[in-house]
């Protein structure tokens, strides 16, 4: 039985009650450009300091493995997987603009390091994965993606199809219990290296109600919104079970960055 390893977190606004989600559309070029700048070539603060350390721990040794980076964005994680010894990394994303950024970053890293990194970068939907063959992948990593997909069932079906028997998937998603955070306190960190950022979290719509919501970035990109799809954890677990996955680990890391004031 394939197994899933889950990790959680993040934020939001405007909610619409609906169990039938809208058709998935690629991000606009402007939003993709903003996201590429935000994530950079190492991930943003949340990824670098909160979720990526757990992600790597759960992934384990990727040497010689065929890995699917499902929803690769600008490709920062795909390149890191290749640098850690993955034999092949299938890097797929629905956005043609993010795929373009991933290809640029891939070329830049290869030129700088004078090393060929085995990435197959293609525009594709994680809900269909038409560019990935059946039972061809050892590990699937989906980093803050599942809450962005309109059709979770088709996504899990595709994951099951491309994963080899006894393969594993490591899934990082925004925690559905909360959808906005407020920084309420800063205090010296215990190790003396900086400040701990202490957040409170709130829920602005019924937790058990599936639906769509949008989040903007006030002060950064207020006129553009990212569409997310809220589902309670029970829905995720039902879909995992439906497609034959067993959950072996579930982590909920605390949301703070001791290195940032």
Image (cartoon, helix red, strand yellow):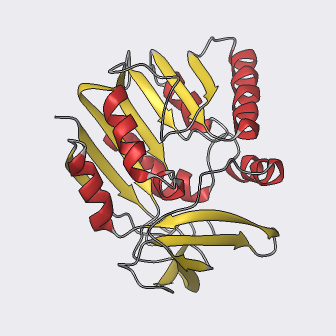
In screen coordinates, is 233 left or right of 129? Answer: left
Q: Is residue 113 above or below residue 217?
A: above
Can you tell which quarter of the image residue 42 is in? Answer: top right
- 12 or 250: nearer the viewer: 12
Q: Please state the horizontal and vertical placement of residue 179, each as a whole percent of the image.
A: 51, 76
The structure residue drawn at horizontal position 22% and vertical position 35%, both measured from the top left corner, is 2
In screen coordinates, is 237 left or right of 56? Answer: left
Q: Is residue 194 above or below residue 95?
A: below
- 54 or 132: nearer the viewer: 132
The structure residue drawn at horizontal position 58% and vertical position 28%, both measured from the top left corner, is 79
Can you tell which quarter of the image residue 222 is in? Answer: bottom right
Locate the N terminus and report the quarter of the image it occupies: top left
Q: Please state the horizontal and vertical placement of residue 66, each as a whole percent of the image.
A: 41, 20
In screen coordinates, is 228 left or right of 61? Answer: right
Q: Is residue 1 above or below residue 11?
A: above
The structure residue drawn at horizontal position 58% and vertical position 38%, both measured from the top left corner, is 72
Locate the C terminus and report the quarter of the image it occupies: bottom right
Q: Is residue 46 above or below residue 69?
A: below
In screen coordinates, is 108 left or right of 142? Answer: right
Q: How many marks?
A: 0
Residue 127 visible in image: yes
Residue 54 visible in image: no
User: In the orientation shown, which residue stands out farthest toward the front?
Assistant: 20
Q: Please state the horizontal and vertical placement of residue 63, each as a whole percent of the image.
A: 38, 19
Q: Please state the horizontal and vertical placement of residue 220, each as a whole percent of the image.
A: 81, 68
């Amino acid at each position: 039985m394939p197994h899933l390893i889950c990790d959680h977190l993040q934020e939001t606004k405007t909610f619409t009650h609906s169990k039938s989600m809208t058709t998935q559309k690629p991000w606009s070029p402007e939003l993709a450009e903003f996201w590429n700048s935000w994530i950079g070539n190492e991930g943003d603060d949340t990824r670098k300091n909160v979720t990526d350390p757990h992600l790597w721990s759960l992934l384990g040794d990727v040497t010689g493995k065929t890995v699917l980076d499902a929803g690769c964005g600008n490709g920062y994680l795909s390149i890191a997987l290749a640098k850690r010894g993955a034999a092949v990394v299938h890097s797929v994303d629905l956005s043609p603009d993010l795929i373009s950024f991933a290809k640029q970053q891939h070329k830049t890293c290869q030129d700088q390091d004078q090393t060929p990194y085995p990435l197959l970068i293609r525009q594709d939907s994680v809900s269909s994965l038409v560019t990935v063959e059946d039972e061809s992948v050892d590990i699937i990593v989906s980093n803050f993606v599942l809450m962005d997909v309109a059709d979770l069932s088709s996504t899990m079906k595709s994951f099951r199809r491309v994963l080899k028997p006894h393969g594993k998937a490591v899934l990082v998603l925004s925690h559905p219990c909360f959808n906005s955070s407020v920084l309420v306190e800063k205090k010296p960190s215990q190790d003396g290296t900086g400040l701990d950022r202490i957040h409170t979290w709130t829920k602005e719509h019924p937790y058990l109600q599936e639906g769509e919501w949008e989040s903007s970035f006030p002060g950064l990109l207020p006129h553009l919104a990212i569409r997310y799809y809220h589902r309670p954890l029970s829905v995720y677990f039902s879909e995992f079970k439906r497609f034959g996955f067993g959950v072996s680990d579930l982590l909920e890391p605390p949301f703070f960055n001791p290195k940032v004031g």
